[in-house]
Image: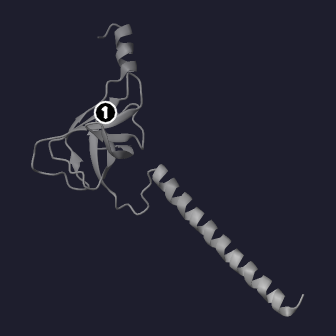
Amino acid sequence: MNRVERLGQAMKRATLDTLSGIFVLIVLVFLSSYSIKLGKMDLFGDGFYQIYAEFDTVAGLKNRAAVEISGVHVGMVEGITLDPESEQARVCLEIKNGIKLQEDVVASIRAQGLIGNKFISISPGGSSRIIPPGGKIENTESSVDFEQLISQLVQGKV
């Protein structure tokens, strides 16, 4: 094999390696973006804003639970903590940008079915004033704790 043939084979190999590398890179970018969409992750934090609400009890509500308005997914529960001053459960909600919540909305903890997963249902308000990012939903309704209700029924306290 002469020098020209070896140079030609080396160039073909380099071109094939470059094309393979580009293909692998495209596949990795596609899989990464699909994984982010599937996990509902927001890498830059610019697709949501946060507000919070306080409830007497949040039994069964978990982080990443859905937030819905009229059955439409508009956000998720970002965190649940105890407010030391009011001793109520403080729930941080991430709401999609573009969704404006009036000051008189009502946030309720609901279950999918009788004992299904808990989520936050927001009933729209009629006020012209909007809750700003970092603001608080004033009107809340805690969920019914069926275990506690049954316990009280059995003990004759209802």
| Residue positioned 60% across, 68% down in the render | 25
Q: Could you tell me residue 112's position as x and y percent?
A: 37, 28
Quadrant (top left/top right/bottom left/bottom right) for the C terminus:
top left
Q: State whether residue 32 is above or below residue 152.
A: below
Q: Crowding at label 1, few (<14), some or many (≥20) Cα neighbours within 10 Å?
A: many
Residue at the right extreme of this rendering = 1
Q: Quadrant of residue 107?
A: top left
Where does label 1 land, which residue? Answer: 109
Q: Quadrant of residue 54?
A: top left
Quadrant (top left/top right/bottom left/bottom right) for the N terminus:
bottom right
Query: In terms of depth relative to the viewer, which is nearer, 65 or 40?
Result: 40
Q: State whether residue 55 is above or below residue 10.
A: above
Q: How many marks?
A: 1
Query: In terms of depth relative to the viewer, which is nearer, 154 or 84?
Result: 154
Residue 83 can be seen, yes or no: no
Q: Could you tell me residue 33's position as x and y percent?
A: 50, 59
Query: In terms of depth relative to the viewer, which is nearer, 134 or 154?
Result: 134
Q: Judge left or right: residue 129 versus residue 40.
A: left
| Residue positioned 38% across, 32% down in the render | 118
Q: Quadrant of residue 29?
A: bottom right
Q: Could you tell me residue 28's position as x and y percent?
A: 59, 63
Q: Could you tell me residue 6's position as x and y percent?
A: 83, 87
Query: In terms of depth relative to the viewer, which is nearer, 100 or 79?
Result: 100
| Residue positioned 62% across, 68% down in the render | 23
Could you tell me which secondary element the residue under label 1 belongs to? strand
Q: State whether residue 110 is above or below residue 11.
A: above
**Kind of residue at disc 1:** Ile
Q: Judge left or right: residue 20 versus residue 60.
A: right
Residue 137 can be seen, yes or no: yes
